[in-house]
């Protein structure tokens, strides 16, 4: 299925995957593309590189797993990464137009639900904005320099 | 970093201890493979279980959930140990507190030594 709204941008400053199907396979492909973009543009040690890739994957995986469950369809998600060379900051947003499942399972299942904790621990700044229109995760890292 | 969601899981016995060696990517697609291997290994009533993540190049929260579920499901007295070292495995496991739930070892030899000590 080709989404007519899908868009791909990849430059030294920006990486965008817009209109990606919110499913596990697309989440993995987007993760791998993002990882290659990071490796080819930024000077990162293996720890920082893994931190970034894992955090954005958790955001994508959350969307793929939960965002459109209650809507009964596979929606789309957008990943946008932008590097600000003057601030040496990389900011990434992952946005969907669905609804995250917010009610915890009862009793709480401690084998699940570490995705958000991971994102917060891995990024220098993390925020999650939820509205009726969807959810946007914003992750920011500092000290990220171009190669 | 590994590309795609390819995960290889091998199981063997070292004495009475089951060792599950995993390599590649453990994410939301491949975590069920690890879960199945752990379930199968525990069904054989080993003295202990070591999940060796040495060759894992990417570990997502889905995989961490499998480890915690295994820890919670293991029979009384059956220790489950994790072998993990480096940016892709031990770092995130420590960040979200899995290392506080179950023992983390840097090498397989170190993990196996705890059973013979």
Image: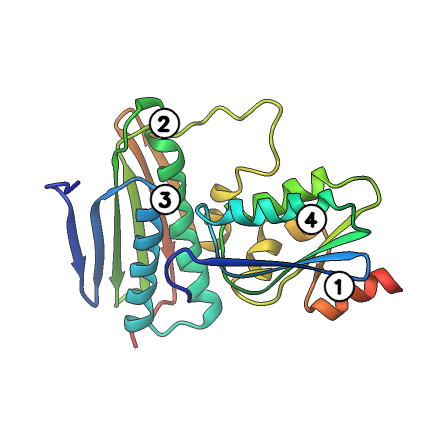
Q: Is residue A88 visible?
A: no
Residue for badge 2: A69
From the viewer's side, name the closer residue of B3 and B64: B3
**Horizontal and vertical percent for residue B52?**
64, 61
Q: Nearer the viewer, residue A87 or A141?
A: A141
C-alpha span from label 3 to label 1: 33 Å
Q: Quadrant of the C terminus of chain B?
A: bottom right
Do discs 1 and 2 belong to a common subunit?
A: no
Q: Compare marks 3 and 2 and give the one earlier in the sequence.
A: 3
Q: Chain of mark 4?
A: B
Q: Which residue is painted at 87% across and 64% down in the image?
A: B116
Residue B93's x, y, as percent? 60, 54
Q: Are dots 3 and 2 in contact, CB under 8 Å?
A: no
Same chain for the residues under marks 1 and 4 in the image: yes
The residue identified by callout 4 is: B41
Count residues near mark 4 (Cα–Cα under 10 Å), then give few for <14, some for 14-19, many for 20+.
many
Q: Position of residue A69 (x, y in %)?
A: 36, 27
Mark 2 chain: A
Residue at mark 1? B111
Element class at badge 4: helix
Judging by the rendered image, the residue that carries numbered circle 3 is: A24
């Amino acid at each position: 299925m080709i989404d007519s709204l899908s868009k791909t941008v990849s430059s030294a400053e920006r990486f965008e995957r817009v209109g990606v199907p919110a499913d596990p396979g697309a989440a993995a492909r987007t993760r791998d593309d993002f990882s290659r973009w990071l490796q080819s543009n930024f000077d990162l040690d293996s720890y920082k590189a893994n931190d970034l890739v894992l955090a954005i994957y958790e955001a994508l995986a959350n969307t793929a797993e939960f965002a459109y469950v209650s809507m009964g369809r596979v929606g789309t998600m957008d990943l946008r990464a932008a590097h600000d060379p003057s601030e040496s900051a990389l900011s990434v947003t992952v946005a969907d137009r669905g609804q995250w499942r917010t009610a915890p399972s009862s009793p709480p299942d401690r084998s699940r639900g570490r995705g958000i904790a991971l994102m917060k621990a891995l990024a220098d700044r993390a925020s999650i904005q939820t509205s009726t229109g969807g959810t946007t995760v914003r992750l920011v890292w500092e000290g990220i320099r171009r190669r | 970093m590994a590309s795609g969601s390819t995960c290889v899981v091998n199981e063997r016995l070292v004495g009475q201890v089951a060792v599950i060696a995993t390599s590649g990517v453990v994410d939301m697609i491949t975590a069920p493979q690890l879960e199945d291997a752990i379930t199968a290994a525990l069904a054989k009533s080993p003295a202990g279980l070591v999940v060796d993540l040495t060759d894992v190049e990417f570990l997502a929260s889905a995989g961490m959930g499998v480890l915690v579920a295994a820890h919670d499901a293991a029979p009384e007295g059956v220790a489950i140990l994790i072998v993990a070292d480096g940016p892709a495995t031990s770092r995130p496991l420590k960040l979200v507190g899995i290392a506080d739930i179950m023992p983390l070892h840097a090498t397989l030899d170190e993990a196996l030594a705890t059973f013979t000590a």
